[in-house]
Image: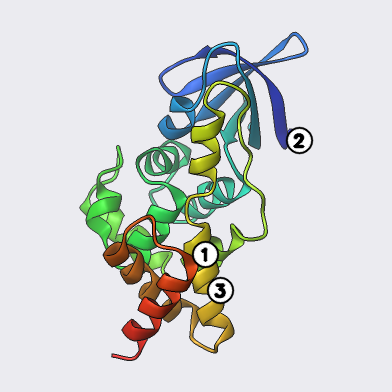
């Protein structure tokens, strides 16, 4: 099974790319978010989820292990296949998705292509207990950052949610239920903005929990 590809971007399509690895071109399905960060001829590293069927082998590429974990988790929800899961991840970053689930904000999830109101509500309801663990997983799994060209932007996007994940972990270590901690930090992140650091998120989260 292929778990990672590192090579040059040979082609970029609407929902896929071709990665040239030592002269061999691999067609990889990817989210719109991941594809936007690629440049023709530039190096890229993708975490791969390989799907093997009787009639085909499909490769799905992600910019981090956390994104791949979300891709797999989303497909545990009835009505969510690989196409819809990629659509969700192309619309929301992993941290935005985690926050939306923590806040019960199904309307944000509904913005993804192929997701209607009922499916968005099902995603939020069924993944509520799993979102905190996936959010904190980002602390322990390094993001995969592309090479030259858009390196600075990729690095910034790869680091999205690190402060949020640290804050959730801190509140959990203080004895709060992971779901409660995730909800409190999601509120804090919404109120304080994307630039808030870990300490500010923790303080705001504690105030939220004290209500």
Q: Quadrant of the C terminus?
A: bottom left
Q: Is residue 85 above or below residue 187?
A: above
Tag 1's secondary structure?
helix
Badge 1: residue crowd in 10 Å (few <14, some 14–19, many ≥20): many
- Mark 2 vs mark 1, foreground winner is 1
Query: Mark 1 and 3 residues: CB-CB less than 8 Å, in contact?
Result: yes
Q: Which one is in front, 135 or 210?
A: 210
Q: Which one is in front, 203 or 72?
A: 203
Q: Is residue 98 above or below residue 80?
A: below
The residue under the point 46% across, 51% down is: 94
The residue under the point 39% across, 62% down is: 196
The residue under the point 21% across, 53% down is: 117
Q: Quadrant of the N terminus?
A: top right
Q: Does residue 118 appear to the left or right of 14 in the view shown?
A: left
Q: Is residue 154 above or below residue 196?
A: above
Task: Look at mark 1 in the image and give the residue it sits on.
Answer: 165
Q: Does residue 170 appear to the left or right of 187 in the view shown?
A: right
The residue under the point 44% across, 76% down is: 202
Q: Earlier in the sequence, mark 2 or mark 3?
A: 2
Query: How many numbered discs sit on the rendered protein?
Result: 3
Task: Look at mark 3 in the image and give the residue it sits on.
Answer: 169
> In this rendering, does residue 50 appear at all?
no
- Mark 2 vs mark 3, foreground winner is 3
Q: Horizontal and vertical percent for residue 141? A: 67, 54
Q: Horizontal and vertical percent for residue 93? A: 42, 47
**Could you give the CA–CA distance between mark 2 and mark 3, rounded to whole angstroms?**
32 Å
């Amino acid at each position: 099974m292929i778990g990672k590809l590192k090579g040059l971007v040979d082609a970029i399509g609407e929902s896929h790319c071709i990665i040239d690895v030592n002269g061999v071109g691999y067609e990889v399905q990817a989210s719109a978010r991941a594809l936007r960060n690629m440049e023709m001829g530039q190096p890229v590293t993708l975490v791969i989820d390989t799907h093997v069927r009787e009639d085909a082998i499909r490769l799905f590429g992600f910019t981090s292990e956390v994104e791949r974990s979300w891709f797999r988790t989303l497909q545990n929800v009835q009505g969510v296949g690989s196409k819809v899961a990629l659509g969700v991840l192309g619309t929301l970053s992993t941290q935005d998705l985690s926050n939306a689930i923590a806040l019960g904000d199904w309307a944000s999830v509904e913005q993804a292509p192929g997701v209607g109101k009922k499916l968005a509500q099902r995603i939020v309801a069924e993944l509520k207990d799993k979102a905190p663990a996936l959010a904190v997983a980002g602390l322990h799994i390094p993001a995969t950052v592309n090479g030259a060209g858009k390196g600075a932007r990729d690095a910034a996007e790869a680091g999205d949610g690190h402060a949020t994940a640290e804050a959730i972990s801190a509140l959990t270590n203080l004895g709060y239920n992971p779901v409660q901690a995730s909800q409190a930090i999601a509120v804090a992140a919404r109120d304080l903005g994307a630039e808030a650091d870990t300490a500010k998120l923790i303080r705001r989260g504690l105030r939220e929990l004290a209500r």
